[in-house]
């Protein structure tokens, strides 16, 4: 049953892709719509990555030293989520302007991979370490990996225009 | 010296030429510019939202303002430093781009904002913690900060969308009516 269902789903996906004409997308027909999406996207990731960075600075022992790491995480988490939601709305809109180009773009693929990895990492290992009040090399390494993952998402996004 | 020749002179420097022509270094500098925005722009937003009482309410204002100050300074240095190099590499294009001047204007306003509110608000974070009600000037400072920094990001992104009027196009437009007349 499942392979048949999957085949049907794949077939209809392909049909949708073929029937979809990006030229009809409002983002391609309004001078301001696309840049506006990009600006919102940038402000969105400033929010999410900036707040993750606060937790990372705490784990590195470089900021909010008088507060426990778990508290910094809990207090910034809602804003991280707000930023992620903004990105996951503006991002797919940007993608919809030219799906085939994005899907074939190596940097876009890298970015999506890095983003999924960064999000999974953020809500599993990163969260666990911050909640456990871990100190020392382990906590620092967790923070550095987190920063590296998020910066690579930004890099992947920017390089879409350069590959 | 016109603005155009000044821009061309600026970008004719070896460093600028090398950066402009590098397929890898140029986007890497741009990535640092953007990553700086992500890491430290977020801190600016969170600081202002703490002053306004919208986020991190259980932290004293002074802890957020003073604790993040050096990180925001470092972030600004990285972001603006990379930005200056990006400008330098293509100075000619930037100087004739209205959005670039919009961004410079925003920055001028940010410097004025700093001159006005640094001493009266940000350097007196402890007083804000003791105040029973948030003083109006602190509220204005935080809101202006969010507006101006978002404005810098907006103007910066729009720089990429400006299409300079092309000299060649202008000449073809000029010739068209003449051709049309002669064929009539």
Image: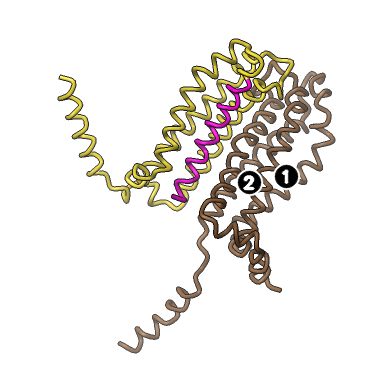
Chain colours: A yellow, B brown
Mark 1 touches mark 2? (CB < 8 Å): yes
Q: Secondary structure at mark 2?
A: helix
Q: Give the quadrant of residue A135.
A: top right
Please identify the dominant SS of the magenta region: helix
In this view, the residue in front, A123 or A95, is A123
Q: Residue at x 42, y 51 (%)?
A: A30
**Residue A96 position (above or below residue B108):** above
Report in which chain the residue with disc 1 lies.
B
Q: Respond whether the residues carrying marks 1 and 2 are from the same subunit.
A: yes
Name the residue at the bottom extreme. Answer: B182
In this view, the residue in front, A96 or B83, is B83
**Residue A8 position (above or below residue B173):** above
B37 on left or right of A163: right
Q: Which residues are magenta?
A: A140-163
Name the residue at the front extreme. Answer: A137
Q: Which residue is mark 2?
A: B152
Asked if residue B162 is among those painted magenta in the image, a careful observer would answer no
Q: Residue at x 80, y 37 (%)?
A: B117
A6 on left or right of B103: left
Dot placed on the residue nearer the N-terminal end, 1 or 2: 1
Report in which chain the residue with disc 2 lies.
B
Q: Residue at x 62, y 34 (%)?
A: B39
Residue A128 location (% of width, % of height): 54, 13
Q: Residues within 10 Å of mark 1 (few under 14, many from 20)?
A: some
**Residue A102 position (above or below residue A140):** below
Q: Which residue is mark 1?
A: B110
């Amino acid at each position: 049953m499942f392979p048949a269902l999957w085949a049907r789903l794949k077939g209809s996906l392909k049909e949708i892709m073929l029937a979809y004409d990006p030229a009809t997308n409002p983002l391609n027909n309004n001078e301001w719509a696309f840049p506006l999406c990009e600006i919102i996207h940038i402000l969105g990731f400033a929010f999410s990555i900036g707040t993750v960075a606060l937790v990372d600075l705490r784990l590195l022992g470089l900021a909010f030293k008088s507060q426990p790491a778990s508290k910094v995480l809990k207090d910034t988490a809602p804003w991280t989520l707000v930023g992620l939601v903004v990105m996951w709305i503006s991002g797919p809109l940007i993608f919809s302007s030219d799906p085939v180009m994005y899907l074939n773009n190596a940097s876009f693929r890298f970015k999506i991979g890095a983003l999924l990895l960064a999000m999974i990492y953020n809500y599993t290992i990163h969260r666990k370490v911050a909640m456990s009040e871990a100190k020392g090399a382990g906590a620092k390494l967790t923070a550095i990996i987190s920063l590296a993952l998020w910066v690579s998402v930004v890099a992947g996004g920017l390089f879409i225009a350069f590959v | 010296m016109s603005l155009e020749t000044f821009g061309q002179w600026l970008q004719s420097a070896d460093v600028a030429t090398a950066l402009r022509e590098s397929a890898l270094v140029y986007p890497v500098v741009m990535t640092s510019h953007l990553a700086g925005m992500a890491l430290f722009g977020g801190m600016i937003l969170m600081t202002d939202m703490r002053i306004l009482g919208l986020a991190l309410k259980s932290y004293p204002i002074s802890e957020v303002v003073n604790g993040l100050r050096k990180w925001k300074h470092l972030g600004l240095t990285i972001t603006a430093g990379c930005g200056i190099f990006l400008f330098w590499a293509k100075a000619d294009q930037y100087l004739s781009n209205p959005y670039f001047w919009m961004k410079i204007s925003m920055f001028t306003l940010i410097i004025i904002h700093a001159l006005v509110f640094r001493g009266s608000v940000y350097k007196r974070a402890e007083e804000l913690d003791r105040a029973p009600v948030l003083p109006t000037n602190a509220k204005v400072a935080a809101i202006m900060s969010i507006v101006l920094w978002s404005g810098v990001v907006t103007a910066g992104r729009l720089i990429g969308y400006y299409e300079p009027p092309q000299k060649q196009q202008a000449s073809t437009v000029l010739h068209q009516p003449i051709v049309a007349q002669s064929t009539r």
